[in-house]
Amino acid sequence: MADDIERLATLLSALPPAPQGWVETAQLLPRMRRQLDGLLARAEADAAVRARLEADLESMLAESGITPTARIVDEVRERMRSF
């Protein structure tokens, strides 16, 4: 097993560094996840917030500092189904 770990470490160290854009995006993900979770918690607790999300999801996301990508919009719609 130790040999496997050393081999894996050798292979990983031979890879080129991740592109800077990937690194920056990975660093932003935890903050964006917290913002999204907070917005959805507010929507679950407050009918007015939920109604605004349902009426204009992309704008509400943008106002909350969340870039409304197709993936995020799909995730929010899916999570809102459980309200």
Image (cartoon, rainbow, N blue to C red):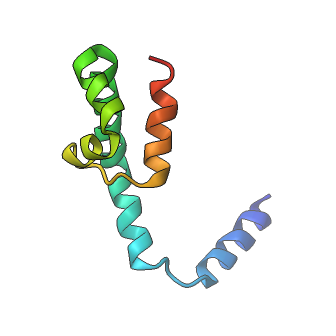
| Residue 36: quarter of image | top left
Residue 19, percent across and down? 45, 79
Does 14 sit above or below residue 29? below
Residue 53, percent across and down? 31, 32
Residue occupying the far left of the picture: 63
Q: Can residue 46 be seen in this view?
A: no
| Quarter of the image with the C terminus in it | top left
Does 45 sit above or below residue 33? above
- At x 49%, y 77%, the residue is 18
| Residue 15: quarter of image | bottom right
Residue occupying the far front of the picture: 55
Q: Is residue 43 visible?
A: yes
- At x 50%, y 43%, the residue is 74
Residue 43, percent across and down? 30, 23
Residue 21, percent across and down? 39, 74
Camera-side residue of 9 and 55: 55
Q: In this view, does 26 lie to the left or right of 60?
A: right
- At x 33%, y 57%, the residue is 28
| Residue 3: quarter of image | bottom right
The mark total stands at: 0
- At x 27%, y 15%, the residue is 47
| Quarter of the image with the N terminus in it | bottom right
Camera-side residue of 52 and 66: 52
Q: Is residue 14 left or right of residue 58?
A: right
